[in-house]
Amino acid sequence: MKASRHLLPQPGDLLCFSLYAASHALNRVYKPHLDPLGLTYPQYLVMLTLWAEDGQTVGEIGEALFLESSTITPLLKRLEAAGLVSRSRDTADERVVRVRLTETGSVLREKAEPIPDCVLQATGLTLTEATTLRSELERMRRNLGEV
């Protein structure tokens, strides 16, 4: 008689796979909206952060997006090369780098404003459903961060 083996779940049975697949699907929805703006999805997140509050430090942006400065810095360099942001040393503490929108970066906000509604519509969720899902995912992320 063969020893019983624990069967491993299939990817589709895993919560992490569902999140992974949904993330890829969302990125495919964002792409045609972001391409005309010359932005990747991570760059778009940085721009959203700056559109909400200009003049943030690299650390503040990283904290808002849960990214290390080693990940943020290349994004900022590409945004700066595109003329959308400028980086400068903080006058109070030269170790700190502040990021500011250029005029071009500020104007881009108007072109980006319809994107969240387009993406929400593509999900097939109501605003209430999307808000509930986001809250649950945020709770899960906080719980995982405590592990």
Image (spheres, rainbow, N blue to C red):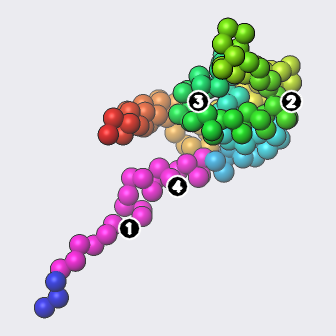
Q: Is residue 116 above or below residue 11?
A: above
* Residue 62 badge: 3
Lower position in the chain sequence, tag 3 or tag 4: 4
Q: Is any part of residue 101 visible from this angle?
A: yes
Mark 4 sits on what residue?
A: 21
Q: Earlier in the sequence, mark 1 or mark 4?
A: 1
Amino acid on which disc 2 is placed: Gly
**Is residue 19 covered in magenta?**
yes
The residue carrying pointer 2 sits among few (fewer than 14), some (14 to 19) or many (20 or more) residues within 10 Å by Cα, namely some
User: From the viewer's perspective, is 75 left or right of 103?
Assistant: left
Alpha carbon separation for disc pair 2 and 1: 46 Å
Q: Residues within 10 Å of mark 4 (few under 14, many from 20)?
A: few
Instruction: Give amino acid for label 3.
Output: Gly
- Label 1: how many Cα within 10 Å (few below 14, some 14–19, many 20+): few
Cα distance in 3D space between marks 2 and 4: 33 Å
Q: Earlier in the sequence, mark 1 or mark 3?
A: 1
In the picture of the structure, the residue carrying the numbered disc 1 is 10
**Dominant secondary structure of the residues highlighted in magenta in the image:** helix
Mark 1 vs mark 3, foreground winner is 3
What is the tally of numbered marks visible in this picture? 4
Which residues make up the magenta segment?
A: 4-26
Check disc 1 and report its element: helix, strand or loop: loop
Tell me the residue at 37%/61% (across/down).
13
User: Residue 42 sits in which quadrant?
Assistant: top right
The quadrant where residue 14 appears: bottom left
The answer to whether any part of residue 118 appears in the image is no
CA–CA distance in space, label 2 to label 3: 20 Å
Residue, disc 2:
83
Q: Name the quadrant of the N terminus.
A: bottom left
The quarter of the rendered structure image containing the C terminus is top left
